[in-house]
Image (cartoon, rainbow, N blue to C red):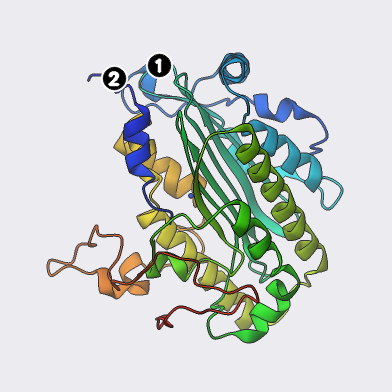
Amino acid sequence: MECFSPTPSSFFSSFSSPSWFSTASPPFLGLKSNSKLSLNRKSRSFNKDGGSRCMSMSHTANESSVFSYKKLIHFALEETNPHTPLAPSPLQEKYSSLLAMDDKTELQMLSFEAPKIRLLRSLCIEGSDGMQVLDFAAFPKPEFDLPIFCANFFTAAKMNIIVLDLNPLHDIMDQEDYTEKYYKDLISLGPKYSELLPWGGKLTSESLRFFSPIVIWTRFSSSPHNHSVLFSAFKEYYQAWLELMDRSEEETDASQIAHNCEAQHRYLTWRAEKDPGHGVLKRLIGDDLAKDVIREFLFNGVNELGSKTFLDYFPEYRCEDGRVNEKRSMIGKSFENRPWDARGEFIGNRVKIV
């Protein structure tokens, strides 16, 4: 089988729309895997020497780049530590470092858990051509109805495609109490950064139902200033999420816990099927391994938190032969401008969420 050497243009096409123990010491970014997942040849297996190789690759990449998303991972782990004790997730044993089919690009994965966090994980990719990817997320345990922290950043040589949000666990269109509980004190973040990081263009209705009024969805050209603004936004959004976590109280009602669990499972099911970043992974590591990383690592829980299928949640995507329609939008409406005002009120035509 020929190795595929990705180019910035091929990565850009995949991201054309959005939907992806103590931590005081940075060496967690060099964690090694003690196991291999081999599907074909060595270029598609976990690299047992991933830690040292990846750090040397990072040094090379940083010499030709003014920034690195690894700085944000360092920040997030160090910022989390005073709020809650992090322990390595069982996933870390299997998913740590993965070498792409070009034998050059390496994927670094970290995963943790905490008393209120089911999974805090990151995927970081730095290519030799200046391409960078960060997929960082924090998923609460079902006993907590916290939003899901989500940062999906893609950078090619000149273009950046960014999604940053505290994804609502429940429907913010109709559940005003949930919006009041988690977003009332954060609404100012939206207008603050929307002026610096303008709306990135059409956003489908299907994606919109998983975003909050403070979502940052933007595209911008690379520059030290723009990256500085983005890093500031990431830090402020993550600090806000940690403060929400600190204040969150554990749910004891079994029916509400089940409701939270299903809401998170619905979110994971959507992301595992329709997230636009999947094309990047397929180009890097092949279809089979990409599916494994997506379902077992990035959106871990899609096979454990519930038994409903994608079509159970989203029947409008069912084809006549029973397959899932590969289109990204079935409702047919998209938003070219920010559909929330400065007060966080939805100003687009209201879409019925089913």
Which amino acid type is shown beneath numbered disc 2?
Answer: Cys
**Residue appearing at x 82%, y 68% in the figure:** 247
Q: Relative to residue 277, is residue 223 depicted above or below?
A: above
Task: Report the amino acid beneath label 1.
Answer: Asp
Relative horizontal placement of residue 219, taking residue 75 as reference (left or right)? left
Which of the two residues, 339 or 59, is positioned nearer the viewer here?
A: 339
Q: What residue is rendered at 46% in x and 32% in y?
A: 158
What is the C-alpha distance between the residues marked 2 and 1?
8 Å
Q: Secondary structure at mark 1?
A: loop
Which residue is tagged 2? 3
Image quarter where the N terminus lies is top left
The residue beneath circle 1 is 103
Residue 73 in the image: state x and y as whole percent.
68, 38
Q: Give the image quarter of residue 124.
A: top right
State the SS at label 2: loop
Residue 334 image offset from top left, x and y in percent: 36, 68
